Image (cartoon, rainbow, N blue to C red):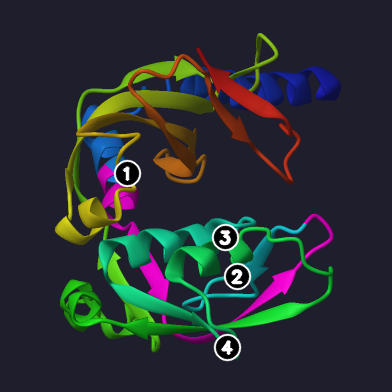
Amino acid sequence: MRAIGCLTFLLAFLVPLAAARAEQPEPAQDDLRVLAEGVLNAQLVDIPTGRLTAAITQDYLQDFDSICGHDPLPRGHSVLILAHAQEAGFITLQLEGISRTPVGIIHELLGAQQVPGMTRHVIVTETDAGREADASASLPPEQRIANCIRFPKGVFTAGNFEIRPAHGGGTSIDPQYRIAVARYDAQWSAPYRAMGEMREYPDQAMIGLLVHVDPADGHWKLVKWTTRSVKSREPMTFLVPRTKYEGSINFH
């Protein structure tokens, strides 16, 4: 009888809990919009200035150890930032100890055949246009960085989201995950337009959010996000590391 009583108690506890999970409402459109616009509008462009050191790697792709307080960026990324910033007239470049044309400097940094292990020192000088583009003074003190031209990418407004369960390999991963996808409108900042980095996403693009409900308060929290061109047919793919749901979660 005591065992039956314990079983009855467990069922009485677990059944309402399961029902509560099953009745978990979908993420609200307004909440998703706040999450999406929060990450989109927080995007900043960072252009390093001063004396930078670029290392030549085994495959001749080069990058700087860190710029503007960031950890190392994907290979070649900061060099491309310098190339775009130079094209926009925000900076001038000079290889220390070597006379090169600006184009020659970028070509050399992007993979001229050098000896792996060598380094190059680059002097990046801010121009009047760069000082005008720099919005650091209008940013909160914690977002201001020395030797760095910093400005927002733009202002973004998200539309209505299409919400689907998260799937991996065609199988539902977890009922507490959702993927939400929407178009967003972009009003690119003038400095970002000058750098030409918005060519792939003219005035509208797609954003995908991977959200997970917090069992403690029932609120949907942002796990990861990504963007795509409106014309892209590739699925939204998220990698969820350090969880039992490792692997890609796709939205088709």
Residue 174 coordinates in the image, percent (x, y) = 62, 23
Disc 4 crowd rating (10 Å Cα; few below 14, some 14-19, many 20+) is some
Residue 75 coordinates in the image, percent (x, y) = 64, 56
Label 3: which secondary element: helix
Q: Are marks 4 and 3 in contact (CB under 8 Å)?
A: no
Q: CA distance from mark 1 to mark 3?
A: 39 Å
Query: How many numbered circles are shown?
Result: 4
**Mark 1 or 3, closer to the camera:** 3
**Mark 1 or 4, closer to the camera:** 4
- Give the residue displayed 25% in from the left and 37% down from the top: 33
- Give the residue displayed 42% in from the left and 38% down from the top: 218
Whether residue 48 is in magenta: the answer is yes
Q: CA distance from mark 4 to mark 3?
A: 15 Å
Residue type at mark 1 is Leu
Left or right, residue 234 beside residue 136? right
Q: Earlier in the sequence, mark 1 or mark 3?
A: 1
Q: Are marks 2 and 4 in contact (CB under 8 Å)?
A: no
Residue type at mark 3 is His
Tag 4 residue: 96
Q: Which residues are magenta?
A: 37-59
Tag 1 residue: 35
Q: CA distance from mark 3 to mark 2?
A: 23 Å
Q: CA distance from mark 1 to mark 2?
A: 24 Å
Disc 2 crowd rating (10 Å Cα; few below 14, some 14-19, many 20+) is few
Residue type at mark 4 is Glu
**Mark 3 or 2, closer to the camera:** 3
Label 4: which secondary element: loop
Q: CA distance from mark 2 to mark 4?
A: 24 Å
Tag 3 residue: 107
Tag 2 residue: 71
